[in-house]
Each structure stands twice: as structure tokens, then as C-alpha cells.
Image (cartoon, helix red, strand yellow):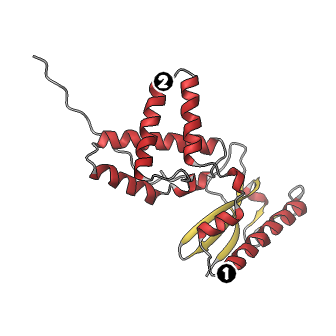
Amino acid sequence: MVQLKVLLDKRTQKSDGTSTIYFRVTENRKVFYLSTGYSLEAKYWDDNKGTVKRTYPNAQSINASISKKYFDIQKAIIELEDEGIFSMDSLKEKLIPRPSLVTFKQFADMTIEELYKKNRVGNAIVYQTGVNSIFKFKPSKELRFTDISSQFIERYIDYLTERGCKINTVGNYLRTLRAIYNKAIKAKLVDRRYYPFAEIPIKTERTAKRAFT
């Protein structure tokens, strides 16, 4: 059964003391978060009602806007269920505007081009090598940032390891992928909630010193 709730993310707080209000969709332990576009201090949020308290300025207008988005999401869920094609991916596709879905390759290419323009040739080559490795693993120009989950990265690590890549090489490729992902978050191309590296340790191995004779 699909559940939809409006919550205040009290776990993370911005520098101004506010937290984001977001929608949470849950189905069979899978979770999809979508920001409402609003944030406020916890003291102005009613946990029981899932609404902004009336003591907050423009509370009525904000609650009306959130309520409209809530019913839009609910409508999308019902439509997908009626069509028999509901999944978190199909819901994301229906709710997230297409123009913002820049592919991983498009953004990676732009990032590498920018490094060359800044004469950071070494960095550009490292990034290009890492990106080439990812597309050998997943040769799809339509790869989206939301496709790059922790499971995707674990499969990618297995792929590299099976092909004889050393721990440090794997680490370099993962750091490149992580750096590009962080830049995409900063550019607001992907929501921070999709960040896949939280539980992915990037290992390093101390290299033995060579003896000179």
C-alpha cells in the first residue's frame, strides 16, 4: 500500500535554523522524497496535522500550496495504480519536470570541458578516465543522476574488481563519480536526498615503497 505524508525534516537544519518541509511516499519499504519548496523553524510546524501553524506569517497561503501539491501527488499515484504501472521510478518521472533531467553524460562532459577551459588539464584527464570507465560499465547516454543509486555503485565496484582493478584505482574512479554528483547537487540538477555515497566507503591501499639500488 502506498502512503503519502507531509513532514518537516528535523534531522537537517539550515544555517538560518529552518528545516525543509517535504513529501514522503512509501511503498514496500521503498521511499521517495519530494521537497515542497518551503522551509521553516520546527516551532512553527504541527507534527500531528502535518501543517504550518497559524502563528507563522502566510501560514494559510503556504498550507494551501502544500495541500494542492499533496493532492497532485495523490492524483499521480492513483493514476499510475489504475494503469497498473505504479513504481517509485514511474512516480518520479510523472512528478519531476523533464527539462531539469540533464543526463549524467551531458553534465560530465560540461564539467570536463570547464576544467580544460580553466587549464586544469590533469583534473580533466582524471575526470574523463573515470567517466569512460562508468560508460564501459553502463553504456547508456540516457543515464540519469537518479539512476546512480548505492546499488548501482556496488555493482560498479564489483565490475571493476572483477576486471582486476586495484583498490586505489577503484577509489579514484569512485571519487570522480562522487565529485561530479556533488557538483550536480550544487547545480540543483538532482536533489540531495538521492545522494548515493552515504553508505559507500571509498577504500585506499597504502602502496609499498620501491627500493632503489
Identify the residue under disc 1: 83
Residues 199 and 152: in front is 152
Identify the residue under disc 2: 121
Residue 109 locus on image (x, y percent): 55, 38
Which element carries disc 1, helix, strand or loop?
Answer: loop
At x 55%, y 45%, the residue is: 105
Residue 157 visible in this rendered orientation of the protein: yes
The three-letter amino acid code for the residue at tag 2 is: Val
Q: Earlier in the sequence, mark 2 or mark 1?
A: 1
The three-letter amino acid code for the residue at tag 1 is: Glu
At x 71%, y 47%, the residue is: 17
Which element carries disc 2, helix, strand or loop?
Answer: helix
Quadrant occupied by the N terminus: bottom right
Residues 177 and 198: in front is 177
At x 53%, y 33%, the residue is: 112
Q: Could you say which disc has been placed on residue 131 in the image?
A: none
